Image (tube, grey):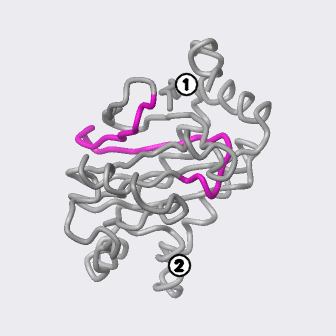
């Protein structure tokens, strides 16, 4: 996963329009009522810890495509549990506007992280493709971590204050089982993540150009 600059003013406006929809009392109250999703296969370890990741390595790969542990509220859960809420009802409209602007209909995830929120180690190898991950942090006190096969170590990309964008590729767990992209994220304060998965590399490249206005290291970003 590589960070790129967000330099498209229109996109930044569309993204900023979602902040008050995620950071509102209805979403906060709903998040407080939901228990953490706990991993029954590894119940006694912190889902963002090194030990949890190394234990997951030994288990069935397909069990960790999606995260088994999280503290946060996906947009789909908000709509399902509060269908009458007018603020929450505006979220899919706002996300759809961003999708249309980017030219990608496949919004894979839109999620609100409360204080001390997290999404545990997983690899998305069951939903492979090129991806674009947009994150909003109030003060940059969260981060995204991933397993680096080359160095056999965990690397962390810190959040920054405001919006940040990361792009990368999730290998297929059936075709590239030895290269699936293990990752997790956590935060101390509220955080938003909006993600897209794109099947065509050329479309992904065009989206990166649009987001960054062409201001990125092609050799570094596109070799993923």
Kind of element beneath mark 2: helix
The image shows residue 34 at horizontal and vertical percentages of 31, 80
Question: What crowding class fits label 2: few (fewer than 14 Cα within 10 Å), some (14-19), or many (20 or more)?
Answer: some
Question: What crowding class fits label 1: few (fewer than 14 Cα within 10 Å), some (14-19), or many (20 or more)?
Answer: some
Give the residue drawn at x 70%, y 55%. Answer: 106
User: Which residue is the site of mark 1?
Assistant: 7
Give the residue drawn at x 45%, y 24%. Answer: 150
Front-lying residue, 107 or 125: 125
Give the residue drawn at x 31%, y 33%. Answer: 158
The image shows residue 127 at horizontal and vertical percentages of 64, 56
Queried whether the magenta region covers residue 98, the answer comes back as: no
Relative to 125, is 144 above or below? above
Residue 6 visible in the shown view: yes
In-image side of 126 versus 138 (left or right): right
Q: Which mark is residue 207?
A: none
In-image side of 1 versus 145 (left or right): right
Queried whether the magenta region covers residue 146, the answer comes back as: yes
The image shows residue 192 at horizontal and vertical percentages of 40, 53
Magenta range: 124-149
Relative to 144, is 28 above or below? below
In-image side of 206 versus 159 (left or right): right
Dot placed on the residue nearer the N-terminal end, 1 or 2: 1
Kind of element beneath mark 1: loop
Q: Quadrant of the C terminus?
A: top right
User: Which residue is the site of mark 2?
Assistant: 79
Residue 37 visible in the shown view: no
Observer-side mark, 1 or 2, equals 2
């Amino acid at each position: 996963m590589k960070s790129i600059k967000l330099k498209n003013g229109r996109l930044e406006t569309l993204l900023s329009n979602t902040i008050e929809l995620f950071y509102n009392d209805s979403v906060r109250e709903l998040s407080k009522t939901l228990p953490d999703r706990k991993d029954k296969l590894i119940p006694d370890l912190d889902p963002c810890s090194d030990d949890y990741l190394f234990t997951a390595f030994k288990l069935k790969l397909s069990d960790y495509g999606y995260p088994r542990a999280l503290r946060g509220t996906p947009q789909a859960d908000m709509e399902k549990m509060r269908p009458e809420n007018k603020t929450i009802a505006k979220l899919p409209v706002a996300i759809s506007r961003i999708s249309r602007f980017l030219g990608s209909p496949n919004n894979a995830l839109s999620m609100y992280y409360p204080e001390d929120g997290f999404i545990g180690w997983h690899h998305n190898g069951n939903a492979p493709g090129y991806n674009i991950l947009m994150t909003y942090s109030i003060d940059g006190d969260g981060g995204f971590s991933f397993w680096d096969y080359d160095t056999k170590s965990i690397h962390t990309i810190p959040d920054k204050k405001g919006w940040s964008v990361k792009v990368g590729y999730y290998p297929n767990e059936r075709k590239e089982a030895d290269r699936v992209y293990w990752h997790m994220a956590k935060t101390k304060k509220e955080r938003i993540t909006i993600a897209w998965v794109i099947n065509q590399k050329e479309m992904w490249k065009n989206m990166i150009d649009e987001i960054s206005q062409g201001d990125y290291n092609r050799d570094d970003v596109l070799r993923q």
